[in-house]
Structures are given as C-alpha cells and as structure tokens.
Image (spheres, rainbow, N blue to C red):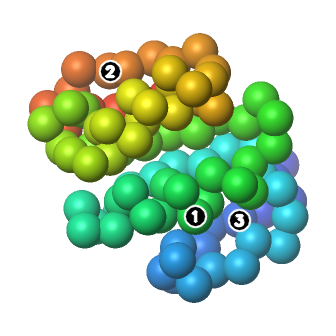
Amino acid sequence: MSLESYVRAVYSSSMDYVHPAKVDFVLFYAELTIQEDESQHCLSVHTPGAMVFFHNSNSAHRPLGEVVDSLIGERVLDKPMLLPTPRGLAIC
C-alpha cells in the first residue's frame, strides 16, 4: 500500500502556499524568524481534531513558545503534549 494517496509533502514557503483543502496533520518547522507568522497563517487550514506539531516550541524559543502556550490557553489547541527536547516539541 502506498502512502501517496494519504500524504502530500510540499517543499515551498508556507507563507505563499495555498492549501487546497483542510488538513488532518500539520508540522510547523520553519526558520525562527517566521515561526510566529507561519503558525498564525496556517492554523486556519486544519480540521477539528487534527494533529498539530510545533518544532522549536519551548519557552526559550520565543516567540513561538509563547504562541503555542497562548493557543493552548485559549483552547485553540487541544490535549497538548509538550516534549522537553532541547528545542521543544509540542504535539496537540
């Protein structure tokens, strides 16, 4: 069984990419300078209950760490699992 019918990997600027449909899984792993803008730009495309991963999300990697904390507090992101890796990984 091929994953091609389930997975679409895109290598492009997340800020320019137009999502053709809602997605069930999002991994945010961007340059530190655009992480906050990228997360705000792309969060609107996930389906309810989607898995959202944020790399570089610990509090030492501001401002994304603060954005993730805020989205969890506002319940935009549900059931967070914050992994204490050196740079942080948030799975919501």
Label 3 crowd (10 A; few <14 / some 14-19 / many >=20): few
Label 1 crowd (10 A; few <14 / some 14-19 / many >=20): few
Q: Pointer 1: what residue?
A: 41
Three-letter code, disc 3: Arg
- Which one is nearer the viewer's eye here, 73 or 88? 73
- Which one is nearer the viewer's eye here, 35 or 70? 70
Residue 2 visible in the picture: no
1 relative to 9 in the view: left or right:
right
Q: Residue shown at 39%/28% (left/top)?
A: 69
The label shown at residue 83 is: 2
How far apart in space, not on screen, are marks 3 and 2 (Cα)? 26 Å
Label 2 crowd (10 A; few <14 / some 14-19 / many >=20): some
Q: Pointer 3: what residue?
A: 8
- The percent position of residue 64, horizontal first and vertical second, equals 32, 46
How far apart in space, not on screen, are marks 3 and 1 (Cα)? 19 Å
- The percent position of residue 51, horizontal first and vertical second, equals 65, 34
Three-letter code, disc 1: His
Q: Residue shown at 32%/21% (left/top)?
A: 83
Which numbered disc, 1 or 2, marks the residue closer to the eye? 1
Instruction: Label 1: state its secondary structure.
Output: helix
